[in-house]
Amino acid sequence: MLTYAIAHMFQLFSYCYVGHELSIQSGNMATAIYNCNWENSDDTELKKAIVLMIQRSQKQQIFTAADITNLDLVSYVTVLRLSFSFYTLFNNLIDRRNAI
């Protein structure tokens, strides 16, 4: 049972870590595009493309689970806390039942 629980925690962590990195990197993309020395270019098509890319990259990308919750490290910790709370609750209920 412990191996099963650890495997599920690792699987959830991998999804949450990827979602967290996606949101961080997509948040930094507009700044990275702006800092690519585009002002030294004489190509007007490049400048138009840079402006379009900056506008498109200002919306941060978020990895979600069925459009219910964001998958990031905050939600991973929330899931761990909630599952441990349920574990302690059920463990206490079982202990009280066995004591009777």
Image (cartoon, rainbow, N blue to C red):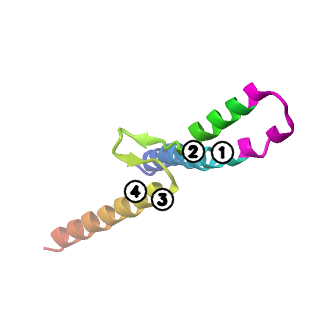
Residue corresponding to mark 1: 30
- Real-space Cα distance between discs 4 and 2? 29 Å
The local crowd at label 4, few if under 14, some if 14 to 19, many if 20 or more residues have their Cα within 10 Å, is: some
Residue 29: where, in percent of width, then height? Answer: 66, 44
Q: Which residues are magenta?
A: 32-46
- In the rendered structure, find residue 79 and report the number of the disc placed on it: 4
- In the rendered structure, find residue 58 and report the number of the disc placed on it: 2
Residue 53: where, in percent of width, then height? Answer: 64, 35
Q: Which is nearer the eye, 10 or 49? A: 49
Q: Residue at x 30, y 62 (%)?
A: 86
Q: Which is nearer the eye, 2 or 87? A: 87
Secondary structure beneath label 1: helix
Between tags 4 and 2, which lies in front? 2
Q: Are marks 4 and 1 in contact (CB under 8 Å)?
A: no
Between tags 4 and 1, which lies in front? 1
Secondary structure beneath label 3: helix
Q: Are marks 3 and 1 in contact (CB under 8 Å)?
A: no
Q: Quadrant of residue 58?
A: top right
Residue corresponding to mark 3: 74
Q: Is residue 35 magenta?
A: yes
Q: Of callouts 4 and 1, which one flags the residue occurring earlier in the amino acid sequence?
A: 1
- Real-space Cα distance between discs 2 and 3? 22 Å
Q: Of callouts 2 and 3, which one flags the residue occurring earlier in the amino acid sequence?
A: 2
- The amino acid beneath tag 3 is Val
Q: Are marks 3 and 4 in contact (CB under 8 Å)?
A: no
